Amino acid sequence: LRKTLLLEVESVRKKLADLVEANSHCPEIERLQRSEFCIDVEERERIAAKTMERCNALRSQIQNENLARELIRERLVAEFWETMQIPGSSIFGMQNPNLTVSNYPMRVKSAAENSRLHKLKCLREVELREKEFLSSKNCPAMLRRDGGAEQPDVLFTSDVFASGSEDYIVNWFSKRAAQSKAENANGEEDAAEAAAAAAKMEKEM
């Protein structure tokens, strides 16, 4: 059926083309305008209005798709381009397109990331220096590594390093606690003596 309709349309198109060609060779007084070939004006206007409606719908659909693509593009640029300190790029060979050289892209680091990286570098440097010290001759025997084997961790008490009488803030609390305890003990002794004296006076009376 579709093939039959296409053949009929092609036949009508060919007849119309022959008529337009013959009309172009007619005398000026007998020549018709191109719009005068259409007999059913209402049908032509209906088809034109329907075509315009379809065009507007298609134009609106394409505009919405373009807006969606632009939004995705802006998000991609903001996420993967503007946040890069060194954007990624590649160089392609002219004679050999399979030959490419790419750079090393780097992202812009935030203040928190820079601070964390600095701390990690410091910790790594301390670790390397500790390893060097533990392997040197200046290391104490209890901490020295014998034959590359690491000695187990040892817990030291503060008595090894300090007598407890140093004027450090860490010792102030223990001194203060001892003084408070002594003052409380003296206060209790004074209260006991006062109670004993009062009892003695009552007996004498």
Image: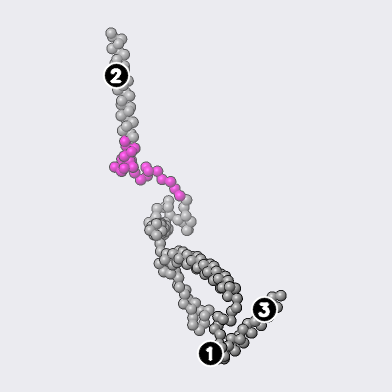
Q: Amino acid at mark 1?
A: Glu
Q: Position of residue 48 (x, y in %)?
A: 56, 73
Q: Which residue is tagged 1?
A: 28
* Image depth: mark 1 or mark 3 in front: 1
- Give the magenta range: 153-176
Question: Residue sitting at 47 percent across and 58 percent down?
Answer: 148
Q: Which residue is tagged 3?
A: 6
Question: Residue sitting at 63 percent across and 82 percent down?
Answer: 13
Q: Secondary structure at mark 1?
A: loop
Question: Residue sitting at 39 percent across and 60 percent down?
Answer: 110
Q: Earlier in the sequence, mark 1 or mark 3?
A: 3
Q: Which residue is tagged 2?
A: 194
Give the CA distance from mark 1 to mark 3: 35 Å
Magenta residue check for 102: no
Question: Residue sitting at 28 percent across and 8 percent down?
Answer: 205
User: Quick check: 121 left or right of 72?
Assistant: left
For residue 51, say whether it is visible: no
Magenta residue check for 154: yes
Q: Position of residue 133 (x, y in %)?
A: 40, 57
Considering every residue shown, the one lying at the far front of the view is 29
User: Quick check: 180 left or right of 24?
Assistant: left
Picture quadrant of residue 27: bottom right
Picture quadrant of residue 2: bottom right
Picture quadrant of residue 179: top left
Q: Earlier in the sequence, mark 3 or mark 2?
A: 3
* Image depth: mark 3 or mark 2 in front: 3
State yes or no: discs 2 and 1 in contact (Cβ < 8 Å): no
User: Quick check: 112 left or right of 35?
Assistant: left
For the residue carrying disc 3, how many other residues have a C-alpha within 10 Å: few (<14), some (14-19), or many (20+)?
A: few
For the residue carrying disc 2, how many other residues have a C-alpha within 10 Å: few (<14), some (14-19), or many (20+)?
A: few
Q: Amino acid at mark 2?
A: Ala
